Image: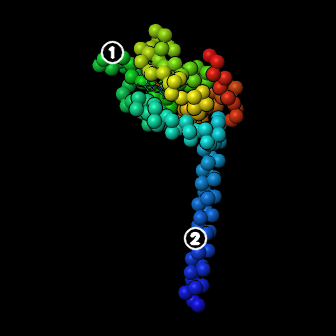
Amino acid sequence: MKGKMEKGNTMKKMKNAKRGLLAVATLAATVAASAGSWGSAAEIREGKMLFERNCASCHGAQGSGPGVDWKKKMADGRFPPPPLNGTAHTWHHKPELLARIIREGGKTYGKAFDGWMPSFGEKLSAAQIESVVKYLHSLWPAEIQKRYDKQFQITATSHITHKE
Ligand code: HEC
């Protein structure tokens, strides 16, 4: 009898613990979405996954850069891939241009850069590229996000037009 009650209590405790975990997970998802201020938590999650598969090898984990000074040429004469996490120029470019750089690769820059970034237009859909851009935005410091959103009139549900 006593054993049964204890078992019952343990089950109850486990259920409560599960409920608690669920609450924490829901909270984390909400925080992720609002901290980024642009895009849903699902889009940002997808963008992160795509970034890790396609971009991190050059641009570093979380867009932190390749671990060398991105303003200095490498031994082979090319500039390294820049960080994308808000410490370089990425946030100076409007969303359509960021999407275009990803779609068409480094040649988008013309002669301003070496243009050796590969194009992803064949590999990623417009929606996937948009998720990646939203993920990049989520990596930037809040202050930069605010300036960016104001300049380019971005709200949480804005979409990229993919025209330019
Ligand atoms: C083979 C290395 C490489 C890969 C992989 C790569 N990039 Fe790049 N990326 C570069 C280089 C190099 C530049 C600088 C322009 C140039 O020389 O092509 C650049 C530039 C950029 C820029 C412009 C940054 C700025 O501050 O102006 C963005 C945005 C960008 N990459 C995003 C991505 C995303 C997103 C992916 C994955 C889908 C990706 N890159 C994959 C090498 C790479």
Identify the image quadrant of the C terminus. Answer: top right
How busy is the neighbourhood of tag 2: few (under 14 within 10 Å), some, or many (20 plus)?
Answer: few
Which secondary structure lies at badge 1? Answer: loop
Front-lying residue, 66 or 123: 123
Q: Nearer the viewer, residue 72 or 7?
A: 7
Say which quarter of the image contains residue 16. bottom right
| Distance in Å between CA atoms under marks 2 and 1 | 60 Å
Answer above or below: position of 98 versus 107: below
- Label 1, on which residue? 77
Q: Quadrant of residue 45?
A: top right
Q: Does residue 140 appear anywhere in the picture? A: no
Report the residue marked by disc 2: 14
Q: Residue at x 54, y 29 (%)?
A: 124
Q: From this viewpoint, which residue is outermost toward the bottom? A: 1
Percent across and percent down for residue 154 are: 68, 29
Q: Quadrant of the N terminus?
A: bottom right
